[in-house]
Structures are given as C-alpha cells and as structure tokens.
Image (cartoon, rainbow, N blue to C red):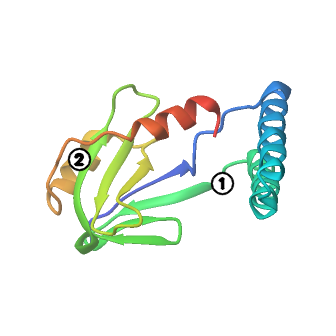
Amino acid sequence: MEHKISWKALEYKRKEKTADWYWAVILISLAMVVTSFILHNALFAILIIISTGILMSFSMTAPKTVSISINQKGIVVGKEMYPFATLDAFWVESADGEDQKILLKSKKLIMPLIAIPLEEHHHLDVREFLLNYLPEVEMHEPLSQKIMEKLGF
C-alpha cells in the first residue's frame, strides 16, 4: 500500500504590480542600456533589452496551479520529481499560516534550495511524513529571495 500526501498550490505568490512598478523597471533598464552604449558594450545593451522584455512578459502571466504530492520515492511538483536520494534535508517553514513552505536542501549544485508552497495542507502531517525519509535541518530562504518577493519579482 502506497502512502501519499497530495495538495494543489499556486506556482508562486502573485503580487499585483502597479503602473509605477512597470515605469521603474523601464527607466532602470533604459539607464542601463544608455550606460552600456556609453561604455561601448552593445551586446550587454541587447541583453538588457531582451531581459526586460522577458521580465515584463512574465510579470503579466498568472501563476498556474500545480499538483504536489509526497510519496515513498520523493516529492512531485507538477511534472518535476525530486527523489529523496537527491535531497539532503528538509525544513517546514510555517512562520505565518498564509506563507507556509517546505524547504528542501538538494545535493545538486545548480539548485541547492527548493521551496515548495504548502497552502492547503497541514504542515505537521507533511513534516511527520518527511521525517521518515529525510533529516530535519533548520533552513531559511535566502535574504535575496525575500527582497525579490518584496520588490514584486
């Protein structure tokens, strides 16, 4: 018999952006493009223009609802599987009832910390289940991630 915990959550927490946010991004990007041309670095200017376009496009996209499940093999988020063999530890961050997350420390260098939203599910059940497979180590999201969330990214 396979034991499993499942729930659905948004990919990321969406923060509505005002017209001021868009103007600020455009003005900062424009200043960087002008500076790049002054420094004779047209390639960097093109990179900034492309990046700004992608950022603006992404900021208008609504987050998708993804299915999340935890079973004996690992954690599945949408179509992505995180086997327990590739993970070092976990921490259930439940500072306030609204912004609960599972933080996973990965053995991979490219993505060392994985944050999974815990919206509908009780964090104690998830913690109990994960304790069977991974050690619990206190972790926190990087300060840079929290700053980016405050800025609306």
- Is residue 102 shown above or below 4? above
Q: Residue furthest front?
A: 39
- Name the residue tied to disc 1: 64
For badge 1, the amino acid type reads Lys
Percent from the top left, x then y, of residue 126? 28, 49
Is the C-beta separation of discs 2 and 1 under 8 Å?
Answer: no
Q: Quadrant of residue 3?
A: bottom left
Residue 19 lies in quadrant = top right
Q: In the structure shown, which secondary structural element does the residue marked by tag 2 occupy?
A: helix
Label 2 to label 1: alpha-carbon separation: 25 Å
**Quadrant in which the C terminus is drawn:** top right
In this rendered view, identify the residue nearer to me: 119 or 34. Answer: 34
In the image, residue 71 lies at what x, y percent? 30, 67
Is 98 on the left-hand or right-hand side of 106?
A: right
Q: Is residue 124 visible?
A: yes
Task: Count numbered badges in the picture.
Answer: 2
User: Could you say where residue 100 lies in the image, as x and y percent from the top left?
Assistant: 40, 37
> Which mark is on residue 99?
none
Q: Residue at x 39, y 25 (%)?
A: 96
**Mark 1 nearby-residue class (10 Å; few <14, some 14–19, many ≥20):** few
- What amino acid type should be assigned to the residue bearing mark 2? Arg
Q: Closer to the camera, 71 or 30?
A: 30
Residue ID for mark 2: 127
In the image, taking residue 77 as reference, residue 148 lies left or right, namely right
